[in-house]
């Protein structure tokens, strides 16, 4: 299937690091847990929406955003984004 938005990719082999024709995978769940299931430097794109601090209680033990102190919330976000960095490929 030709790529209309990125025609320069049409001539690249399927194993190309920036191949937008390959199937993606959507993981749902706590990013701190789900990202640990992936090999390092293998993800091309990661999209997340961490909860705001103190805004909602989803009723999940250890949820991000339910920390009592702002530094604890920031620490949790740093931990999460360190995992994003570790799993993201250099070309990602």
Image (spheres, rainbow, N blue to C red):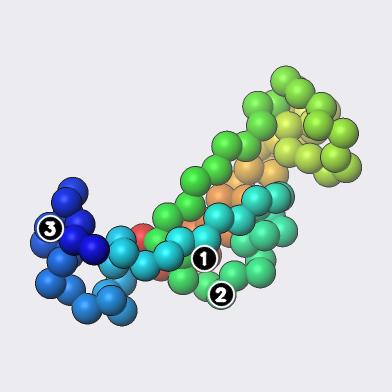
| Disc number for residue 7 | 3
- Closer to the camera, 23 or 75? 23
Q: Is residue 65 left or right of residue 3?
A: right
- The crowd level at tag 1 (other Cα within 10 Å; few <14, some 14-19, many 20+) is many
Q: Quadrant of residue 19?
A: bottom left
Which of the image's four quarters has the C terminus?
bottom left
Local SS, label 3: helix
Label 2–label 1 contact, CB within 8 A: yes
In what element is the residue under mark 1? Answer: helix
Q: Quick one: label 1 or label 3, which is nearer the N terminus?
A: 3
Q: Is residue 88 visible?
A: no
Please determine whether, in this image, residue 32 is positioned above or below residue 19: above
Q: Residue at x 87, y 34 (%)?
A: 59
Closer to the eye: label 2 or 3: 3
Identity of the residue drawn at 62% across and 61% down: 35
Compared to residue 20, the image places residue 51 above or below, namely above
Kindly identify which residue carries mark 2.
Answer: 39
Residue at 20% across / 57% down in the picture?
3
Q: Are marks 1 and 3 in contact (CB under 8 Å)?
A: no
In the rendered structure, are the residues bearing label 2 and label 3 in contact, judged by CB atoms less than 8 Å apart? no
Relative side of 18 to 53, left or right: left
Return the residue nearer the eye: 39 or 85.
39
Choose the circle earlier in sequence order: 2 or 1: 2
Of mark 2 and mark 3, the one earlier in the sequence is: 3
The quarter of the picture where the N terminus appears is bottom left
The x and y percentages for residue 90 are: 36, 67
Q: Position of residue 26 (x, y in %)?
A: 55, 55
The spot of residue 65 in percent (x, y) is 73, 32
**Which residue corresponds to mark 1?**
87
Q: Pick out the residue farthest to the front.
A: 1
């Amino acid at each position: 299937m030709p790529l209309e938005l990125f025609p320069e990719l049409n001539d690249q082999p399927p194993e190309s690091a920036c191949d937008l024709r390959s199937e993606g995978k959507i993981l749902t769940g706590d990013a701190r847990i789900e990202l640990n299931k992936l090999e390092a430097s293998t993800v091309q794109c990661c999209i997340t929406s961490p909860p705001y601090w103190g805004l909602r209680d989803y009723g999940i033990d250890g949820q991000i955003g339910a920390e009592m102190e702002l530094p604890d919330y920031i620490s949790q976000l740093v931990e999460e984004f360190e995992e994003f960095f570790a799993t993201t490929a250099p070309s990602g």
